[in-house]
Amino acid sequence: MLTVRLGIAAVVVATAAGCGGSDQSKPAPSVSGEQRGVLATVDALQAASRHDDARRICTQLFTKSLAASIRKSSKRSCEAEVHETLTSPDAQLSVARRITVKGSRATATVHEETGKVSTVTFVRDGGRWRIERVTPVKSP
């Protein structure tokens, strides 16, 4: 079951990938075209969040089933819930380097600024990646 506030908030993440105190420079791992597509969806989510465009988030970036789940669990429109819980002019979105793509499905591990970790599931729909599910990872 989707926990709307935690689930949506889990998409707003900060990653430590690429940051560190080492003097040694390691080349960044290459990113496939499919992984770039997933990252583009996260970038689009950030832009829509910053512009308070909850409608775009619900209709273009989330799958129809995720938007319906949000409506059902929040007992109000997806747009109203996303406006309340996700949009912010200061939104900073990024995704951890671990992006797995298998056919028309992808998953990415994301880290919130608070240290919480979630798995975001994407599905390719009409040539674009959409957010299908956000699952918080339980801490040990």
Image (cartoon, helix red, strand yellow):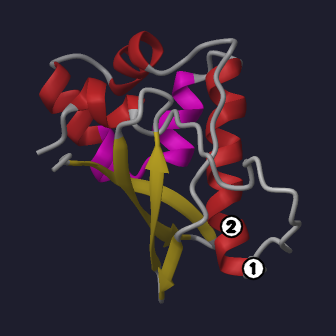
The residue nearer to you, when weighing 72 against 49, is 49
What's the magenta bit mostly, secondary-structure-wise? helix
* Image position of 55 with respect to 14: above or below: above
The disc labelled 2 sits on which kind of residue? Gly
Which labelled disc corresponds to residue 33? 1
* Image position of 72 with respect to 99: above or below: above
Q: Secondary structure at mark 1?
A: helix
Write the start and end of the magenta stretch as one range: 54-67
Q: Measured from the top left, where is residue 137 in percent x and y?
A: 24, 51
Q: Which residue is mark 2?
A: 37
Is mark 1 in CB contact (under 8 Å) with mark 2? Answer: yes
* Image position of 71 with respect to 128: above or below: above
Q: Measured from the top left, where is residue 48 in percent x and y?
A: 66, 29
Which residue is rendered at x = 53% and y = 27% of the image? 55
Q: Secondary structure at mark 2?
A: helix
Which residue is rendered at x = 42% and y = 22% of the image? 82
